[in-house]
Amino acid sequence: MDFHLKKRARNEIKVEVVSLETKYPHNVMIYNYPPIDDIQIEEFEDLALERLRLLRIFDHAGAKGLRLLSDDWKEYVNAELSREGLRNYLRLCTTSGGSATGAKHEADIQTRRRDYLSHFILRLAYCRSEDLTRWFIGREMEYFKYKFSALSGPEIKQFLETNNFHFQPLTESQKDEIKDGLYESTAGQSVTKIELLDFYKVPFTQVLDLVRGRRCYLNAGYAYVNTHDLVSIVGTKQQDEIEQGLQAAKLLIDDVEADERIARMLKALHTSYTGKDYTVSREIAVPIESLDQLSKTSMPLCMRICHEHIRTQHHIKHGGRMQYGLFLKGIGVTLEDSIRFWRDEFSKKMDVDKFTRSYEYNIHHNYGKKGSMVNYSPYSCLKIIKEMAAPGDCHGCPYKALDQTTLKSKLTSYGLSPSACEEVMYFVSRGHYQFACGKYFMLTHNSQTEVAINHPNTYFEESQNLMGNRQKRNPSSQASQAKSKIHQNLIKGHADRSMLMGQDDDELWRIAESQERAYQSQKGISEAFDDDLDLTEIVD
């Protein structure tokens, strides 16, 4: 017998490596094939939140009443994309796919990859309900149309070929036959530019929106569409792909959510806060003696109402303590001052021992000092709007929770004129509570600049910046450092804390600046701010 091992023929499987440029060849892509990439859970979550920030910008632009693709709309969207750190997505929307070279080209390809993957990740989050699906499709189509509008004529032809749109532009002789109709139906273009445009002959049923808007020439059941209006046709296919993809994702959602980490993230995604982290205040400490004045000048309505409630009722329910307590932590109230603030108020209705037993632990818990040791984040606008306040509660979003009569009365009592109240109520009546808060900010600060309010601590920070109390200073400037030191000492309470009661922060700043100038002229900046400086003398 032959016991020698026989070699078996091995079938080697060759894995074809496809470059990213081949997989994502174009800035504008039809999302028709789900990606098969392997990614880490951290990147999965980063991509989801990045896409959500992107889509929310388009949502805010629409809520402001800006017409899609108008100059004002583009200006707002471009500014927000830059502000949110999404400049790579801005390049996809404003530059042609082949214009970049070298490092920029590589960055664009990476952005295309993130764009493609993040779209499919959000399908898993937005397939759950009709309302979520409608919101997602609307924002995705606005994003798609913006990208498509940046394409040049040759790039549009490449896009049509890549995605199997079998449209051929009219020949010059065909255009001459119907040129009068093309001139009349193409608005906003000169005759010279119209002659340079490519036109496509398609069944009129594929461009009903153009027909409805009288933006194309009709003849014998066909519509003649110019290059820029082709988005009406390709957009229909894109929308069909997204709708069908959402239906497919809905069937697979149970399998996807077998991983609890993914399930938890997807369920909470739509209401996730995507702005600045206010878990720990990195600014100067805010003394509790200044809260009465700050509530009038720099707190949003939701927090001002909570503050006034605790100051008048000397008690507030758990929801209010969480909402307002975490907000105070975010603006810079220390743990010790926070305990003192709540103890001083609650002890007006109960003895100190009861407060210590029943409430003090929760304050330590919010600051991450006891219990699970989690440093909790202040509530965002989305979380506050979702809060269902019961009768007698003062927390939640007042623009949503209060009836219009009560809300108008509250705004009037805070100094808004009837016409100003109507400006705020315009957004309230349409359910745009954050825009109502932004309008309230503009009116109370006499500001002409619109502020995107998505977090109460953002409101406070923007207010302080506008009032000059938290302006960024040049660390290399000695004079700036000197002013900063005086201001920090005043806020931290090295001076008599009673001086901050009921006085405007601007007055303290002016006093500090005037004293600083006096010291500069007498001793020089280096001698004016030694450690032994008595700030009570400055205020006097």
Image (spheres, grey):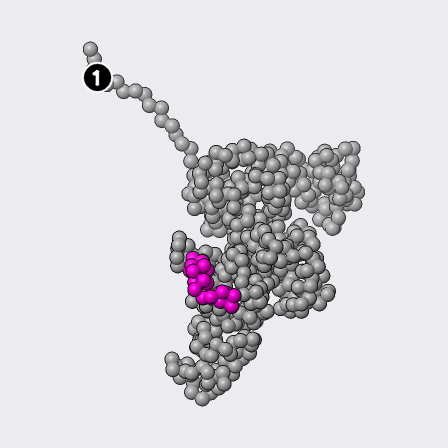
Instruction: Indicate whether residue 221 is drawn in magenta.
Output: no
Residue found at the far top of this picture: 1
- The residue pinned by badge 1 equals 4
User: Which span of residues is magenta-colored?
Assistant: 345-366
Instruction: Name which residue lies at 56% across and 54% down.
Output: 384
Asked if residue 376 is positioned above or below residue 284 in the image, the reply reads: above
Which residue type does callout 1 highlight? His
User: Closest to the observer: 164 or 206?
Assistant: 206
Give the image location of residue 413, x and y in percent: 67, 67
Near-viewer residue (485 or 363): 363
Give the main secondary structure, helix, strand or loop, of the magenta stretch: helix
Res 489 quadrant in image = bottom left
The vertical placement of 57 against 241, above or below, is: below
Dot 1: few (<14), some (14–19), or many (≥20) neighbours within 10 Å? few
The location of residue 253, given as percent across then percent down, is 51, 35
Residue 428, by quadrant, is bottom right
Question: Relative to 449, is 89 on the left or the right?
Answer: left
Relative vertical location of residue 366 with respect to residue 268 in this rendering, above or below:
below
- Where residue 1 appears, as percent x and y from the top left, is 20, 10
Work out whether residue 443 or residue 295 is closer to the camera in this orientation and state it. 295
Task: Tell me what residue is drawn at x 47 percent, y 56 percent.
Answer: 377
User: Is label 1 in a helix, a strand or a loop?
Assistant: loop
- Residue located at (48% from left, 71% from top): 287
Above or below, 126 against 331 in this view is above
Q: Is residue 146 visible?
A: yes
